[in-house]
Image (tube, helix red, strand yellow):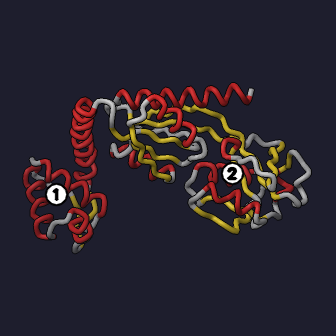
């Protein structure tokens, strides 16, 4: 069994299509098909159910894919460990986040300790984020909701109240708090479904008998404040993401515990570099400090 066979198998399993997998791997369809066929011959069983060029993992394939992913994962960890030893003080930390409001401050604090470490950050939904974590393509995830999964360590680092942002001049702007039932006829701006804060807010409001009317749904949480200021709609904003803005008022939510748990996620089987360990400590220290400030 060859490493190339496993890599091709995983790509075909991911895309479920020979043509698309060949294009992704930059090989011919015939070469890809022959490689998969040799792998199946080595194993003595077919791994896919085939309909033309469309393939789906069968029972054997579903069992084998977990082992193949683990094998490639361990090899990648070996490469990372050797690379870490050879580079010393340099390298790149790869992060995936569903909440980015606190990230600049965290990165700034870490850079004081490790100025030569670079960052690569992706803003993703929870599902996308955890998928990359399982594949070993990111070092840490900063999530706006906890996640429990196999081989995933989840540590809640902060309990973050969610506030209602309203523009000055709004009927509620002279208030310090608001009941959810008072918002049933309002228009809202928010991020798309799949982001932890959006899903949490929708769930709590639905339990209160309210279906929020969204007039804007996007992928950039930082844009919401500008939309509120422009009086496009109100927004639910976590306390860590609020911006001191003269044209915006933030109201607490009455009678409902509307808070999000910010969690740090990492893969328990992944090799952790010294820089990664230091980054995790910076994250924990940062949220401990703002927790003490809010108490």
Residue at figure coordinates x 83%, y 64% from the top left: 185
**Could you give the CA–CA distance between mark 2 and mark 1, rounded to whole angstroms?**
46 Å
Residue 255 sits above or below residue 223 on the image = above
The quadrant in which the C terminus is found is top right
Q: Examine the image and state in which quarter residue 293 appears.
A: top right
Mark 2 neighbour class, 10 Å CA radius: few under 14, some 14 to 19, many 20 or more: some
Q: Residue furthest bottom?
A: 52
Q: Examine the image and state in which quarter residue 259 appears.
A: top right
Residue at figure coordinates x 26%, y 41% from the top left: 73
Residue at figure coordinates x 28%, y 62% from the top left: 56
Mark positioned earlier in the residue sequence (2 or 1): 1
Query: Which residue is nearer to you in this view: 135 or 57?
Result: 135
Query: Which residue is nearer to you in this view: 108 or 165?
Result: 108
- Dot 1 lies on which element? loop
Q: Position of residue 35 (x, y in %)?
A: 11, 59
Query: Which residue is nearer to you in this view: 269 or 292?
Result: 292
261 vs 210, left or right, is: left
Q: Which residue is mark 1?
A: 46
Q: Position of residue 106 (x, y in %)?
A: 54, 36
């Amino acid at each position: 069994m060859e490493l190339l066979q496993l890599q091709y198998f995983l790509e075909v399993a991911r895309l479920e299509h020979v043509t698309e997998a060949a294009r992704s791997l930059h090989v011919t369809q015939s070469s890809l098909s022959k490689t998969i066929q040799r792998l199946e011959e080595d194993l003595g069983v077919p791994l896919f159910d085939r309909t033309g060029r469309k393939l789906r993992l069968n029972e054997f394939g579903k069992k084998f894919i977990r082992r193949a992913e683990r094998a490639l994962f361990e090899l990648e960890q070996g490469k990372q460990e050797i690379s870490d030893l050879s580079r010393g003080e340099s390298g790149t930390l790869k992060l995936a986040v569903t909440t980015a409001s606190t990230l600049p401050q965290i990165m700034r604090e870490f850079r004081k300790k490790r100025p030569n470490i670079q960052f690569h950050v992706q803003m993703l939904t929870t599902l996308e984020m955890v998928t990359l974590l399982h594949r070993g393509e990111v070092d840490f995830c900063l999530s706006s909701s906890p996640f429990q999964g196999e081989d995933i360590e989840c540590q809640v680092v902060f309990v973050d109240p969610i506030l209602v942002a309203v523009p000055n001049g709004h009927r509620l702007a002279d208030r310090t708090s608001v009941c959810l039932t008072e918002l049933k006829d309002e228009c809202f701006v928010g991020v798309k479904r799949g982001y932890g804060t959006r899903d949490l807010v929708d769930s709590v409001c639905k339990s209160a008998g309210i279906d929020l009317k969204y007039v804007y749904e996007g992928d950039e949480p930082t844009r919401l404040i500008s939309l509120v200021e422009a009086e496009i709609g109100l927004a639910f904003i976590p306390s860590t993401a609020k911006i001191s803005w003269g044209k915006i008022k933030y109201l607490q939510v009455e009678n409902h515990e509307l808070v999000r748990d910010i969690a740090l996620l990492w893969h328990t089987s992944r090799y952790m570099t010294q820089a990664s360990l230091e980054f995790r400590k910076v994250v924990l220290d940062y949220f401990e400090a703002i927790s003490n400030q809010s108490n």
